[in-house]
Image (cartoon, rainbow, N blue to C red):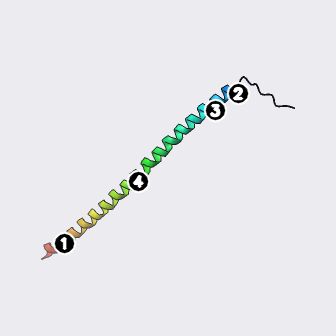
Amino acid sequence: MALDLNTTNVPELVAEVGKLGSWLQAIGIIVIVWLIFQIISLIVNLKKKKLLEKISEDIKRLEKKIDRLKKK
């Protein structure tokens, strides 16, 4: 048995596959850009968290000093 392809539909099929490929490319680019923004956001948030922890430690240290001065 030979495989019989209708040659009139092959260009249409190739065009449809090309459109699908373009959509997949666009979705891939969107996902990559989204991942880049998420990574940048993560880095910024980690820096903010580190700064807030440092400020919190400084406040605790100052509170201890104030408590010591109150006792005197």
Residue 17: numbered disc: 3
Q: Which residue is mark 4?
A: 42
Q: Going by the image, does 57 lie left or right of 18?
A: left
Q: Which residue is mark 2?
A: 10
Measure the C-alpha gap from mark 2 to mark 4.
47 Å
- The amino acid pointed to by label 1 is Lys
Judging depth in this view, the residue of 39 and 13 nearest the camera is 13
Q: What is the quadrant of the N terminus in the image?
A: top right
- The amino acid pointed to by label 3 is Val
Image x and y of residue 63, in percent: 21, 68
- The amino acid pointed to by label 2 is Val
Image x and y of residue 17, in percent: 64, 32
Q: Are marks 2 and 1 in contact (CB under 8 Å)?
A: no
Question: Which quadrant would residue 12 be assigned to in this image?
Answer: top right
Between circles 2 and 4, the one closer to the viewer is 2
The secondary structure type at the circle numbered 4 is: helix
Image x and y of residue 54, in percent: 29, 64
List the single residue furthest toward the left: 72
Task: Choose the circle earlier in sequence order: 4 or 1.
Answer: 4
Q: Which residue is mark 1?
A: 65
The secondary structure type at the circle numbered 1 is: helix
Task: Choose the circle earlier in sequence order: 1 or 3.
Answer: 3
Task: Choose the circle earlier in sequence order: 2 or 1.
Answer: 2
